[in-house]
Image: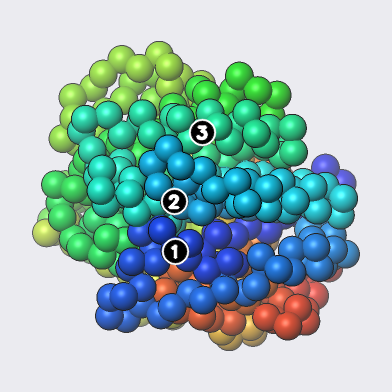
Amino acid sequence: MFDDEFIWGAGCSSVAVEGAGLRSDWYRFEGTPDVDQSGDGNNFRSRFVEDFALLAEHDFTHLRLTIEWARIEPFPGRYDRDELEHIEEVLIGARDAGVSIWATLHHGSLPGWFAQDTDGFCSTTGPLVHWSRHVDRMAEMFDSYVSAWWPVEDPIGWALNAHHYGNRPPGRRSPEKFRDAVEGVIDATFDAHRLLSSGTNPVIGSFGLPTLHSTQPEADRERNHWEEVIWRSWTRAITEGVFQLPWKAATERPDMADAFQAIGVGIASPVGVDPTGSLIPWPQSGRRDETGLTPTPPALGETLQRAAQLLHGKDLLVTGLGATTANDGWREELFEGWLDQIAAVGNEGLPIRGVFVEPAIDGYDIAARAHLDSGVFTRSREPKPSLAWIAAQQ
């Protein structure tokens, strides 16, 4: 299954490795209870040359790297030239080390002026104006330095965490904002594909895809509701050019049809849906990570089979291969289970093209909202036993 063309990569958010930008919504969020200060992340900002060499040495020759919008444009229309020069230096450093960059434009944090002052992706009065301008500028400046674009890491997951669970900025639960956020961020993700496709690099769509389970028969209706939101909203847009949500009538969107050269399938723990529509960890008896979720390798096999079926055989990448835990022995067990699932469905002919481990290096974990030893390298850049297990598969 894991032949010479199989991609072994790593992924990271800017907050995790650099800390929150001073003008980001995450920096403001760190002033709320139960959210630790991100500080310098894992000090990637000053150690990127060393880190690229480390990744390349261990055959992680692809990196999904987040270019932090809040650092580039801290105020609307005002660009930080020093930051743009720093990003160019980072991208050149990756190229020199033999690491291909898959550039992400939104993963977890946004400029405060965009997310909070203009209502960001929740706005019903044209949030794409600011976003589209940013996407265009990044493509113009950096398309020649990157190997692929990855516009938004798990857009629906962002909306869920930010406005349904309230565990990401702005940290408030609002059903109305959640609905606006889902619609807005999906639209933004597809709009980024349209803009970036004018260049030479492939554009990747990435979605966290949990298996959904009714906690009891009376919950089937609510489970189907969440199925439409998390799975069918964007897959139908790609395969049929139709965009629909449970609260939004179907609209013809030919601009969304056949979007993205590949789809990132995010590792996501199974989710139970109860009769009230609440989402809970599943199974309830499962082993919990630091966020209370229950990572379960067999669920990944089900997810990959379903994604391949709904997307009519589009190329797939497994993303977020990691666990929000400091227990490296458990992480190794999960890696073994997940890679067994990937190999099994790949041997059945499913188009699984690669995996991205996340995080690679211990730092700030945005899921736990705290510093956590959840990587395969320590903060001092020493390899852990779980890394050796992955290396044996490469």
Q: Earlier in the sequence, mark 2 or mark 3?
A: 2
Image check: 325 left or right of 75? right
Image check: 4 left or right of 104? right
- Mark number, residue 22: 1
Residue at position x 38%, y 34% from top?
130
Q: Nearer the viewer, mark 1 or mark 3?
A: 1
Residue 333 visible (yes or no): no
Q: Does 58 sit above or below residue 125? A: below
Place of residue 362 in the rendered image (x, y in percent of width and height, measured from the top left): 63, 76
Q: Earlier in the sequence, mark 1 or mark 3?
A: 1
Q: Amino acid at mark 2?
A: Pro
Image check: 216 left or right of 329? left
Q: Nearer the viewer, mark 2 or mark 3?
A: 2
- Mark number, residue 74: 2
The quarter of the picture where residue 167 lies is bottom left
Identify the element where label 3 is drawn: helix
Q: What crowding class fits label 3: few (fewer than 14 Cα within 10 Å), some (14-19), or many (20 or more)?
A: many
Q: Are marks 1 and 2 in contact (CB under 8 Å)?
A: yes
Residue at position x 43%, y 37% from top?
77
What residue sits right under mark 3 in the picture? Answer: 135
Identify the element where label 1 is drawn: loop
Q: Does 163 sit above or below residue 75? A: below
Place of residue 84 in the rendered image (x, y in percent of width and height, measured from the top left): 63, 46
